Image (spheres, helix red, strand yellow):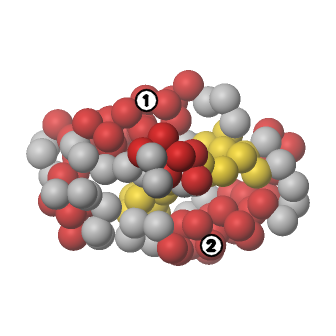
Amino acid sequence: MPVGQEFKSMQRRLSSAAGAAECKSMVEESPVVVVARRGCCMSFVVRRLLQSVGANPAMCEVEERHVDELARHLAEAGGGVLMQLPAVFVGGRWFGGTERVIATLIREELRPLLKQAGGLWL
């Protein structure tokens, strides 16, 4: 499968109420997932930062009208924490948002965390 097609299969745009459950299963199945509002510029930044260390994160983009429902579903996966988007999940657990990705990248802690979760191609 060509690389471009493989990436597209890992990006989902969820526009239905059932999308929250689909996004939750994506978080459980993929080593690195970025969940964001559709069209969010910060999701692009987070994705590029993760790619800069060798990860290929799955993207789950949600329509604005389904964000609240999705936040409730993701709070279950994140240990009850109500999170803001974009939210990054590593190894099926909530990792944090944009600030945490940047902080761990600067401290050179991001690559080992992603490697341990199976999210790197190294």
State which quadrant residue 36 falls in: top right
> On the rendered image, what quadrant is the C terminus found in?
bottom left
Q: CA distance from mark 2 to mark 1?
A: 24 Å
- Please provide percent x and percent y for residue 24: 64, 68
- Please provide percent x and percent y for residue 3: 42, 45
Q: Is residue 35 visible to us here? A: no
The type of residue carrying mark 2 is: Ser
> Which tag, 2 or 1, sits closer to the chain's start?
2
**Left or right position of 4 against 113:** right
State which quadrant residue 120 falls in: bottom left
Q: Is residue 5 visible to us here? A: yes
Taking the spot 18% from the left edge, 52% from the top edge, the residue there is 111
Q: Is disc 2 surrounded by few (<14), some (14 to 19) or many (20+) residues within 10 Å?
A: few
- Please provide percent x and percent y for residue 84: 58, 46
Determine which of the numbered discs, if any, sits on residue 45 in the image.
1
Residue assigned mark 2: 25
Taking the spot 71% from the left edge, 67% from the top edge, the residue there is 22
Taking the spot 69% from the left edge, 36% from the top edge, the residue there is 38
In the displayed structure, would residue 27 be above or below residue 55?
below
**Left or right position of 68 against 115:** right
**Left or right position of 21 against 5:** right
State which quadrant residue 115 falls in: bottom left
Q: Nearer the viewer, residue 121 or 42?
A: 121
Q: Residue furthest front?
A: 1
Q: Nearer the viewer, residue 113 or 96?
A: 113
The type of residue carrying mark 1 is: Val
Query: How many numbered marks appear?
Result: 2
Q: Are marks 2 and 1 in contact (CB under 8 Å)?
A: no
Taking the spot 79% from the left edge, 42% from the top edge, the residue there is 63
Q: Secondary structure at mark 1?
A: helix
